[in-house]
Image (tube, rainbow, N blue to C red):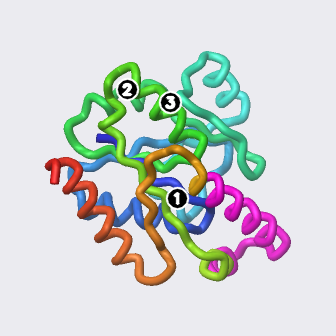
Amino acid sequence: MIVTLTGASCAGKGFIASKLLERLPNAKLIPSHTTRGRENRDLPGEYVCVTPKEFKALKDANAFLWNISAHGNEYGTMRALVDEAFEREDEVLIMMVVSAVDKLIAYARPKNKENDILSFYILSNRDVRKKRFIKRGDDPEDIERRLRDCEMWDEAALKSKIPYIFVENNASIVLPVDEIVKLILDYQFGL
């Protein structure tokens, strides 16, 4: 099963993913390729950092299932890694943007793997996100732009036809992690 975690910046996707990897010992994270440098908050194995030239070569070779430009950098997930994930018996986590989940579902449909995808969208309110941006040291002007971007992403997710399970992450991180683990296990065992 592929579990997608989607949400705007500072919604807590990375932290939730790290806790899910601890709680689901057989779970694996599919890395995304990116042109941005590694950051302290990145999970081990979350990104494969490449040069813009390397990214373009992979893109030109149609190696990515999806790719986007965001905040001045390129991001993409390799098609081969998604194919491998569909063959695994354990959970595989992918952190994705809204437009990528649509592409994943469309890619899975002809393979009869659509029901092997469980998609979560992590929501956080503006005040919580702003505190998180400030805490991680983002530039004040950049914070306002990113908050506007976050609101657009949330709105797009809420209006999309993607079968998201929406999870609030405004207080204790334990609650959303517990909720997601329970839903993953229920889904796996048909409960």
Number of numbered tags placed on the structure image: 3
Q: Is residue 106 visible?
A: yes
Say which label, 2 or 3, has the lower sequence index: 3
The quadrant of the rendering that contains the N terminus is top left
Question: Is 119 drawn above or below residue 20 in the view shown?
Answer: above
Q: Quadrant of residue 8?
A: bottom right
Closer-to-camera residue (18/66): 66
Helix, strand or loop for disc 1: loop
Q: Please tell me the numbered disc located at residue 83.
A: 2
Taking the image as shown, residue 156 lies to the left or right of residue 189, namely right
Residue 67 x/y as whole percent: 62, 34
Residue 14 belongs to magenta span? no
Question: Is 118 drawn above or below residue 144 in the view shown?
Answer: above
The reply to whether callout 2 and callout 1 are in contact (CB within 8 Å) is no
Residue 89 x/y as whole percent: 20, 37
Q: Residues within 10 Å of mark 3 (few under 14, many from 20)?
A: some
Q: Please tell me the numbered disc located at residue 78.
A: 3
Q: Residue at x 68, y 62 (%)?
A: 150
Boundaries of the magenta span:
131-156
Q: Quadrant of residue 148?
A: bottom right
Q: What residue type is labelled 3?
A: Met
Q: Please tell me the numbered disc located at residue 136.
A: none
Q: Residue at x 67, y 48 (%)?
A: 36
Say which label, 2 or 1, has the lower sequence index: 1
Q: Mark 2 to mark 1: distance in Å?
A: 24 Å
The residue beneath circle 1 is 42
| Main SS category, magenta section | helix
Q: Which residue is drawn at 40% across and 28% down?
A: 108
Q: Mark 2 to mark 3: distance in Å?
A: 9 Å
